[in-house]
Amino acid sequence: MKLERDVIVDLLPAYFSGEASAATRTLVEDYFRQDPDFEKFARGAAGPLETLKVPTMAPDPTKEKLALERARLVTETRSSFLWLAAINTLMLFIFKVQNGKLVWIMWTNSGTAGILFAAMAIFLWILFLYTRKRTDPLPAHTKFLCMSIFYSLLLFLFKIENHKIVWLFLRNDTNVGYVFAFFALGLWATYFYQRWKFKQTQ
């Protein structure tokens, strides 16, 4: 996955001076492989990496550390959403063989579990695609906003039964609906608090 070019540019002084850590070198070289034109521009010559020596200012260890941490957070966030989305998607296809027939476990009885996991999978795929386009880490308040919206929307999940709309978490045993509602309220409160903290640091 591509990282923001500015992050790589921040790492180039340490990389070209030969004082970069192994993690930094791997990150820069991975980016070079993704963008050969940028590599040529950054080098100023097409010589092998081993002979490349650029007389630049001494690298700033603090700046390198911050850039690496930023890149790590970006890739870890993307990877987390990708794996969670894939797992929730696969859960929809779990089955067992009963009386010689396939039984889709998540879709038996009322199918509520299947709808719930489908909603979670869609939500996580959207987050993955969103973070894939981002070049900087998601702020904490943005993560809480996404979760707040998701748990709020869960209350409105429905299916059509006997030509009527049936609210999945607000029928029969409404305790699940109340739990989701209180959880959503807690997430909204945390979101506004994190947003307030974020604005204070700007």
Image (cartoon, rainbow, N blue to C red):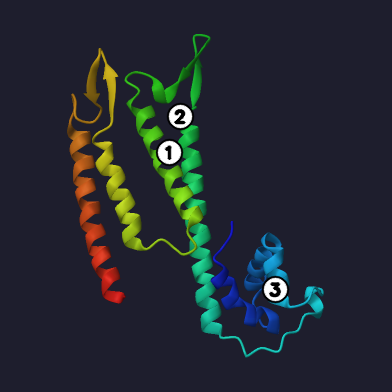
Q: Which corner quadrant holds the C terminus?
A: bottom left
Q: x%, y% of residue 20?
A: 65, 79
Which residue type carries mark 2? Leu
The residue depicted at 32 percent of the width and 26 percent of the height is 112
Q: Which mark is residue 92?
A: 2
User: What type is the residue that disc 1 sits on?
Assistant: Ala
Residue 193 screen position, x and y as percent: 23, 63
Mark 3 Cα shell of 10 Å, populated few (<14), some (14-19), many (≥20):
few
148 and 178: which is toward the camera: 148
**Mark 1 vs mark 2: which is more N-terminal?**
2
- The nearer-to-camera label among 3 and 2 is 3
Q: Nearer the viewer, residue 134 or 144?
A: 134
Q: Which residue is mark 1?
A: 121
Q: Does residue 45 sit above or below 38 in this rendering?
A: below
Above/below status of 73 relative to 58: above
User: Where is residue 42, by image quadrant?
Assistant: bottom right
Q: Which residue is mark 3?
A: 41
Identify the secondary structure beneath mark 1. helix
Which label sits in the foreground, 3 or 1?
Answer: 3
Residue type at mark 3 is Phe
Q: Kindly report the distance in space between the C-alpha atoms of the residues bearing marks 1 and 2.
A: 9 Å
Residue at 23%, 47% in the rendered image? 184
Q: How many marks?
A: 3
Q: Earlier in the sequence, mark 3 or mark 1?
A: 3
